[in-house]
Image (cartoon, rainbow, N blue to C red):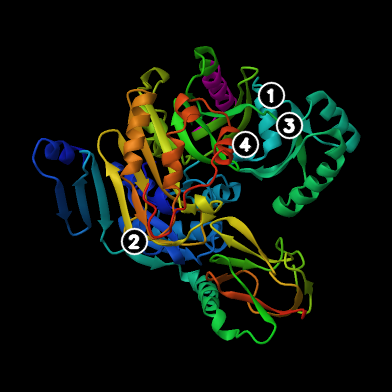
Amino acid sequence: MIFRRILVANRAEIAVRIIRTCRSLGIEAVLAASEADLDTVPARLADRVICIGAAHSSASYLNADAIVAAARTVGADAIHPGYGFLSENRRLAHACAAAGVVFIGATEEQLAAVGDKLTARSHAVAAGLSVVPGGEIADLDRARQLAQNIGWPILVKAVGGGGGQGMQLVNEPAAFVDTIERAVAEAGAAFGDSRVYLERFVAKGRHVEVQVLGDGERVIHLGDRDCSVQRRYQKLVEEAPAPHLSDDLRTSLRHAAVVFAEHLRYRGLGTVEFLVDTERSAFYFLEMNARIQVEHPVTEAICGIDLVAEQIRVAEGRPLRLQQSDVAMTGHAIECRINAEDWSQDFRPSPGTVTEAVFPAGDGIRVDTHLQAGTVVPPYYDSLLAKLIVHGHDRADALSRLRRALDRCRITGVATNLAMHAELVADGEFVRGGVDTAWFPRFLAGRASPTPAHAGDSRG
Amino acid sequence: VLEILHLLDSAQFDELELQTEHFHLVLRRTEGGDWTRSTEVTAEPRVGRLDDAKADAATAAALTASEASDGSAAAAGEGMSQVRAPLPGLFYRSPQPGAPPFVETGSRVDEDTVVGIIETMKLMTSVQAGVRGTVDAILLEDSRFVEKDGVLMRIVADSG
């Protein structure tokens, strides 16, 4: 089936991004928007806009029935869910199938396989991948036994958690039982699923992920990305390829990701996440994200491939256009997530109205954003304002472009973390490359007092 | 845009402004020679509605209506303290949906008693009473939107 019209069921920069590819493919793009998003840049770029509910996402972007009804109302052939919201939601995939609309994403079966962390772990084991030492907890006695085998410290994780939610660190046996009981209670309340499991806590870990693309028969990878610069499990800077990995390790990571996706007979665009233990020079499967990711542009930069276009193509039921040997990677790309957060005030969110939005332009520079002067940044959704992506001949060249590009960003009206990025990309350890996930908190703590960034002027 | 920039680089221009029916683009050369751009999409959105979106619209109206319930309705009297929203967002009275509220009218509170949560951009910020006393009135219903500094509740401070 060739799509003529796609319903874009998302907002902000990713909606703009998807609409752009629809345009280039000659597909009509209809935006499904909440009451709060009817006069935004993606709404202005879309061929049409359909209102799917109130501002709060539970009434709109998380309302599968309203989204499917919107697709039927406008006669869309397919729904692109973007990332977040319902992008990996089985119920939406199922409702789409029932309504005869294509869900641009993984199959219901695959969403089930990777959506539950324990199921994903067992699939990884079945596919021959290493997982972080750990396992499910049946009862306290077995949990104690398991903890002995894993070694301290240990992470207690909720099966239904994700994005840093539902995780507790236990440093010593004395606190173990209390933490498990609390974790079970909290997991039940927060995710409606009280199952928890144990994992070894890897102190010196890097977060490296591999982009994969499958058509249900064949899977290729599009290289790796490093996303180790995180604050409270939220990524801030991503780069491709992951710096300073040995050739062996890189090849093994990419191979493992393809093997895992092949095991699922994966169809669509996906990312296999790994924890790279820099002390042991080993890597473990963490999870798979069955959707387009925020950081996809760094992969697009080094591969020269439009991932959304490939995703749509596969969703149309067509075979992969590319062989693995067609994928050539050149140079190095880095992305900074520019958020409406005042980093001088403990990253306090800063909704408001943008008065000025100036971005860099030139060779090797890409800005994905939904901002322009007058854009309202509502308090209902996440704080991502723009992604600045630079592509250089090598990492040093990318860094130098990035510094100059950050200097030219000017967003006023809301507080941003631009000043944080400017300091971060000048930090010695970051410049050397290959930092682990413990680096960013250390970088923050090492700064005596951040220079105040005023809401009125947050020049980078 | 890149091609335009290459063209401009080979010329003496430092600024280009382009206005069409759908967008407005300004390219400027900075002192270092690098370029900046600012774009404005001026096309008007073409908005349609779902037939059954009326109920949702009503919910939205209810949500925005509560924005009006800010400080004006809650004048502070003698020994009366107001708890204000530290930032704009949705006000929650309980730690989780279905859980009992943090406080009710008549609850005793200390300075650091958590009396509610504000959700802004997916971040939960707890709101503390700020004063030792008794909750006199809760002025905003659960899950309602509040502006920064909007009054959430009144507390009668203990004297002395």
Q: Which residue is mark 4?
A: A114
- Residue furthest front in the image: B160
Within 10 Å of disc 2 (Cα), the crowding (few <14, some 14-19, many 20+) is some
Q: Quadrant of residue A161?
A: top right
Within 10 Å of disc 3 (Cα), the crowding (few <14, some 14-19, many 20+) is many
Q: Which residue is mark 2?
A: A355
**Separation (CA) of disc 3 from disc 2:** 46 Å
Within 10 Å of disc 1 (Cα), the crowding (few <14, some 14-19, many 20+) is some
**Separation (CA) of disc 1 from disc 4:** 13 Å
> In the rendering, which numbered label is found on residue A199?
3
Which label's residue is closer to the chain start, 3 or 2?
3
Q: Can residue A213 be seen by looking at this rendering? A: no
**Separation (CA) of disc 2 from disc 4:** 42 Å
Q: Which residues are magenta?
A: A252-268
Secondary element under disc 2, as helix, strand or loop, is loop
Select label 2 or label 4 by which is in front. 2
Q: Where is residue B100? Give x, y as percent.
A: 77, 67
Callout 3: chain: A
Q: Can residue A434 be seen by looking at this rendering? A: yes
Q: Which residue is mark 1?
A: A125
Give the overall secondary structure of the magenta segment: helix
